Image (cartoon, rainbow, N blue to C red):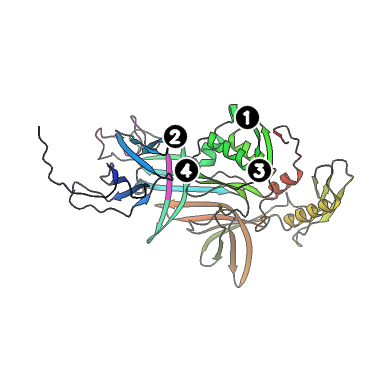
Amino acid sequence: MTLDFVVNEQIADGKWPEVVQFYDTSAEIFKVNGENKLMGDGIARLKGNFTNFEATESNVISPDDAIRDLRINLMAGFGMVGSYKTGDKQKMIIYEYSREIGGYLESGTIRNTSGSVIQSFSFTIKNPIDTLSEDGSNIAISEKKALIAPGAKVTLTFAMGEEEFEMGTFYIDRSEFEVLKETIEAEGRSAIGKILKDQSVDENYALELDYADENIIKLLEYAGINHDYYLVEKSEEWSSFEFDPQLSVLEAIQDILKNLIDWKIEELTDGTIVIGSKNYGGFTTKGNFEFSRDKDIFSRGITRDDADVYRKVCVHTGDYSIKVFKAVETFSSWNLQSNKTLYVNVPDGTELQKAEQYAKEVAERLAYVGKIESFTSKFTPFLMVGDVATIKDNGEEELGEVTEVEHQFGHDGYYTNFTVDSGGRVGKGRLADYISKITQIKTNTSTKYE
C-alpha cells in the first residue's frame, strides 16, 4: 500500500522535532533549538485544514540544558510520554491532556481565610454528551469514565478583555454524578491541602541536622512536589527533627516554621508553594484596594463580639519571676470588664526587656479587636487574604486587613465577598501565630534541636 500525502511542508525548525495533535485538533510542536533547549510551539485548531498552520511564539518548556535525543509517543486517552538526554542523565516526559471546560461552567466559588493556608473551591458544570468521543459518553463524567475525578487538576482563569487573571490551581476531592442529570457538582482544594496535608511523613519522620530550608525541601520533594513548583528561602538555622510518623507533611513543615521568626507558607495562584519570611521575594506582594460604599459595595454586615476582647495583657514566665502588664486600647463605647486579661506564657529565662517588648506587641495587636465587617462587592478576582482594603464612605475612610475572601462566579453573576477584621493589624499577621512563636519552647515532643 502506498500513502500519498496531499500536504507536505516544513512547519518548524529544530532538532528531533515531534508534533502532537490534541482532542480539539489544536497541536504542539516539540523541538530542540540551536541552544539545545527544549521548546514548545502551539498551533491553533487545525479542523482538518493542514495548509495553514498558525504557530505561536516558541517557549522554553524544560529547565534543563544540553538536551538531545528527544523522543515522544502518544498513549490513547491519556496524553503522551517521552524522554530526552541531558548530560549523563536520561529524563522522562509525561504529559496529561488538559481540557477547556469554561464553556460548561454553571457556577463556582473559591474560598480563602486567614486561619488556613488551604484554599478550597466548588463548582457546578453542565455535563452534555461529548460529540468528539467515540462511545458517546458525557463531557465531564459518566458511568464509564470521569474527567472530573478525584485528583484531577483544575486551573481557574478569569479573562477581562485582553487580560487574564489566574485565580488558583486546585485538585478535585469529590465529584457527584447522577445518570440523566444535566449538571455535576465537584469540590476540591489547593496543592497545600491535597498534596501536603493528605500525606504523612511515614518513614521520613527523622530529619538529620541540616539547615531548616534544606529539611523543608526534603519534605516537599518526598511529597512529590517538583522543584519547579516550590520556592524556599535560605535559612541560617540549623536543626534536626523527629516527628510522629503519622504527622502530615504540612504539619511537619509548620512545626519547623514555628521556630523561624516571621516565616510562613503560602500557595501562589499557579500552584507554586512558597515558604520563607514575610519579606521573602517569592511571595505575591499584597495589594491595596479601595472600595466606595455607594459604588463598589452591594451589601454590608457588621458583627461586634467581645469574646476575644481584652483590657489588659500579661506576658510572664512559668514561675512568674518575670511578669509584665500592658493596657489594651478598646472601643470607648463598649462597656467591658476592666480586669479581663490575656496571659501569655513565654519560656523561662526570657529577659525583662524582651518580655516588655512582647507585651507591647501583643497589646497593640489586641487593640480594637471585635468589630468584623463583611462586604459583597463587585467581582475582584485579584483580591486576596492579607490585602489591605480602604472603605470610603462620605469622605471618611476605614483601613483594615482582608481576612476572608470568597469569589462567586457563574450564570447568576460575578461577586466577591470579603471580610475586614478590626483585629487584623495591617502587615502584622495573625495574633495566634505570633503568640505561638514567642511561647514556643525548643524542647517540644515532636522536634529535637542540636
Where does the magenta region start and end? 131-156
Q: CA distance from mark 1 to mark 2?
A: 27 Å
Task: Report if the CB atoms under discs 1 and 4 are less than 8 Å apart.
Answer: no
Is residue 338 visible to the viewer in this orientation of the structure?
Answer: no
Q: Which circle's residue, 2 or 4, is located before the other in the chain?
A: 2
The quadrant in which the N terminus is found is top left
Task: Measure the alpha-carbon separation of dots 1 and 3.
Answer: 16 Å
Residue identified by numbered label 2: 150
Mark 4 and mark 3: Cα distance apart in space: 24 Å
Q: Earlier in the sequence, mark 3 or mark 2?
A: 2
* N-terminal label among 4 and 3: 4
Residue 389 sits above or below residue 10 on the image = below
User: Regarding mark 2 in the picture, which secondary structure is present there?
Assistant: loop
Quadrant of residue 346 within the rendered picture:
top right
The residue tagged 4 is: 170
Question: Which numbered disc, 4 or 3, marks the residue closer to the eye?
Answer: 3
Residue 77 lies in the magenta stretch = no
Q: Chief secondary structure of the magenta span? A: loop
N-term mark: 1 or 4 = 4
Task: Name the N-terminal-most of marks 1 and 3.
Answer: 1
Q: Badge 3: how crowded within 10 Å, few (<14), some, or many (20+)?
A: many
On-image quarter of the C terminus: top right
Which kind of residue does numbered mark 4 sit on?
Phe
Q: Quadrant of residue 70?
A: top left
Task: Report the Cα–Cα distance between label 2 and label 4.
Answer: 11 Å
Instruction: Report which residue position mark 1 lands on.
Output: 205
**Residue closer to the observer: 336 or 396:** 396
- Mark 1 or 4: the one toward you: 1
Between residue 40 and residue 249, name the one nearer to us. 40
Q: Determine if the magenta segment contains residue 149.
A: yes
